[in-house]
Image (spheres, rainbow, N blue to C red):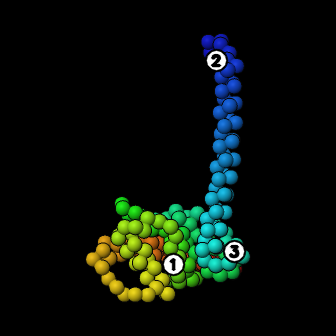
C-alpha cells in the first residue's frame, strides 16, 4: 500500500476462509445437483415402468417443463409442473419421437381444488391414450396453460431427436 502499512494477518485469514467457503459451496452444489438428478430419474423410472429402465436426467426448466428423463431404450418422459394460484398439478408425460404425448402419469399435487383437478383431466386427455370429451366452463381458462406445456414438450423432444439424428450422420 502507498502509506506503508502492511496487510493485517486477520485479513489474510478472512480471505482464505472465504476461498475455502466458496470451494465447499461449489462441491455442495455439484453434489446436490447430482442427487436431485438421481432422485428425479428414479421417480420417472418407477412411475413409468420397471426399475431396469435407468434413465438419464436432464434439467431443463422451460415453462412448465422441469426436466427430461431419457432411457437407453424406450420413450423419453418429461416432468411437468402446471401451477395455478390455487394449486399445482405435477405429472410425467411419456412422449414419442415427434413429441406427441403418449401417456400421462399424475404425481402428487394439490388436487383437492376443482381447477387443479380439471387441469389434470385436460392434460391427461391430451395423450394418445386419453379418453373423454367432456367439457366444463373451466376449460376455456385452462386450455392455454395445457397447450403451452404441450407445445414446449413437443419442441424440446423434436430438438432432442434432431440432435441425435445429427450425431448419427
Rendered residue at 40%/78% (across/down): 122
Tell me the tag on residue 1. Answer: 2
Q: Residue furthest top?
A: 4
On residue 22, which mark appears? none
Which numbered disc, 2 or 3, marks the residue closer to the eye? 3
Label 1 close to label 3 by CB (< 8 Å) = no
Badge 2, how many Cα within 10 Å: few under 14, some, many 20+? Answer: few
Work out which quarter of the rendered image holds the N terminus and state it.
Answer: top right
Front in this rendered view, residue 58 or 35: 35
Q: Can see residue 107?
A: yes
Q: Residues within 10 Å of mark 1 (few under 14, many from 20)?
A: many
Task: Tell me, yes or no, if residue 82 can be seen here.
Answer: no
> Disc 3 designates what residue?
51
Q: Looking at the image, which residue sits at the far right? A: 52
Residue 161 rendering spot, x and y as whole percentages: 60, 78
The circle on residue 104 is 1
Helix, strand or loop at disc 1? strand
Task: Give the answer, above or below, for where 14 lies relative to 7.
Answer: below
Relative image position of residue 3 (x, y in whole percent): 62, 12
Where, by quadrant of the figure, is residue 59 drawn? bottom right
Q: Is residue 148 left or right of residue 139?
A: right
Q: Residue at 68% across / 52% down in the picture?
A: 31
Above or below 114: residue 127: below
Using the rendered view, name the quadrant where residue 73 is placed.
Answer: bottom right
Query: Are the residues flagged by discs 1 and 2 in contact, CB closer than 8 Å?
Result: no
Distance from Cα at disc 1 to Cα at disc 3: 18 Å
Q: Mark 3 Cα within 10 Å, few/some/many (few <14, many 20+)?
A: few
**Residue 151 occupies quadrant:** bottom left
Tell me the CA gap for discs 1 and 2: 66 Å
Residue extending furthest left?
137
Q: Residue at x 69, y 24 (%)?
A: 12
**Residue 109: x percent and y percent?**
47, 65
Amino acid at each position: 500500500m502507498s502509506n506503508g502499512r502492511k496487510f493485517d494477518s486477520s485479513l489474510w485469514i478472512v480471505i482464505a476462509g472465504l476461498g475455502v467457503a466458496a470451494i465447499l459451496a461449489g462441491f455442495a452444489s455439484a453434489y446436490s445437483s447430482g442427487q436431485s438428478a438421481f432422485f428425479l430419474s428414479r421417480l420417472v423410472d418407477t412411475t413409468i415402468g420397471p426399475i431396469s429402465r435407468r434413465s438419464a436426467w436432464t434439467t431443463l426448466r422451460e415453462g412448465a417443463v422441469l426436466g427430461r428423463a431419457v432411457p437407453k431404450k424406450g420413450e423419453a418422459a418429461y416432468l411437468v409442473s402446471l401451477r395455478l394460484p390455487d394449486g399445482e398439478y405435477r405429472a410425467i408425460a411419456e412422449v414419442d419421437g415427434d413429441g406427441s404425448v403418449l401417456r400421462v402419469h399424475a404425481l402428487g399435487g394439490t388436487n383437492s381444488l376443482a381447477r387443479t383437478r380439471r387441469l389434470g383431466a385436460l392434460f391427461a386427455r391430451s395423450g394418445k391414450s386419453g379418453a373423454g370429451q367432456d367439457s366444463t366452463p373451466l376449460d376455456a381458462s385452462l386450455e392455454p396453460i395445457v397447450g403451452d406445456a404441450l407445445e414446449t414438450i413437443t419442441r424440446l423432444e423434436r430438438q432432442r431427436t434432431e440432435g441425435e439424428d445429427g450425431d448419427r450422420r
